[in-house]
Image: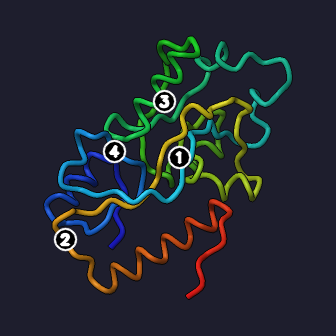
Amino acid sequence: TIVTGDNTVLLEQLRVGDLDLVVGRLAGAERMAGFSFEHLYSEQVVFAVRTGHPLLGAGKSFFAELGRYTLLMPTRGSIIRPVVENFLIANGVASLPSQIETVSDAFGRAFVRDSDAIWIISNGVVARDFADGVLVALPVDTSETKGPVGLTVRTDSVPSLPLSILMQTIREAALEISGQPAPAH
């Protein structure tokens, strides 16, 4: 079973044994008691828009224009929410009049493709959309939003064989994403 959701919900489900594994950003130290984290790669947040979005035009002041658009924001329980808020504040954006909170990649993808909305999301979620030319990243330096992505498990559990196989498959996929060669079997 695969479940998506914000980090707070997923870690609670992991804590009580409803989930065996969480794949995602490293949670804050206060949430990691009883868990171990295996770092796979690091990624940053991007501002994804549809091809032809008005902010892709020359001469636009990105942060000054941001308030004119609906923003899809990570939910308050997501790991990247404080990262995004700090990034916006550091760039002079104190409030946003029109925002939708979501961790649904299906909704985000559909909404942004059919509107001028801006989706603030981890690069890995939209990397394939960028590669396919369906979505594009606004030319904003978000390198300071970079954070570790990996596997979180309970420290008191031993992975079953199927879970071990899944974790190894995820490790190998992460190596491909990061451009490193996969280990030989």
- Mark 4, mark 3: which one is toward the viewer? 4
Of the image marks 1 and 2, the number of the one nearer the N terminus: 1
Q: Nearer the viewer, residue 146 or 135?
A: 146
Name the amino acid, label 1: Gly
Q: Nearer the viewer, residue 60 or 19?
A: 19
Kindly give the residue lying farthest to the front in the view shown: 184
The residue identified by callout 2 is: 157
Q: Secondary structure at mark 2?
A: loop
Find the distance from the CA under tag 3 to the CA under tag 1: 16 Å
- Mark 3, mark 1: which one is toward the viewer? 3
The residue identified by callout 1 is: 108
Find the distance from the CA under tag 4 to the CA under tag 3: 15 Å
- Disc 2 crowd rating (10 Å Cα; few below 14, some 14-19, many 20+) is few
Quarter location, residue 136: top right
Q: Secondary structure at mark 1?
A: helix
Q: Residue 27: horizontal and vertical position, in percent? A: 33, 44
Name the amino acid, label 4: Ala
Identify which residue is drawn at 57% across, 31% down. Answer: 144
Of the image marks 3 and 2, the number of the one nearer the N terminus: 3
The residue identified by callout 4 is: 27
Name the amino acid, label 3: Val
Of the image marks 3 and 1, the number of the one nearer the N terminus: 3
Q: Residue 139: horizontal and vertical position, in percent? A: 74, 32
Quarter occupied by the C terminus:
bottom right
Find the distance from the CA under tag 1 to the CA under tag 4: 23 Å
Answer whether labels 3 and 2 touch (C-beta < 8 Å). no
- Mark 3, mark 2: which one is toward the viewer? 2
Identify which residue is drawn at 76% across, 28% down. Answer: 54
Identify which residue is drawn at 52% across, 24% down. Answer: 87
Q: Is residue 99 left or right of residue 17?
A: right
Q: Is residue 107 left or right of residue 18?
A: right
Q: Which mark is residue 150?
A: none
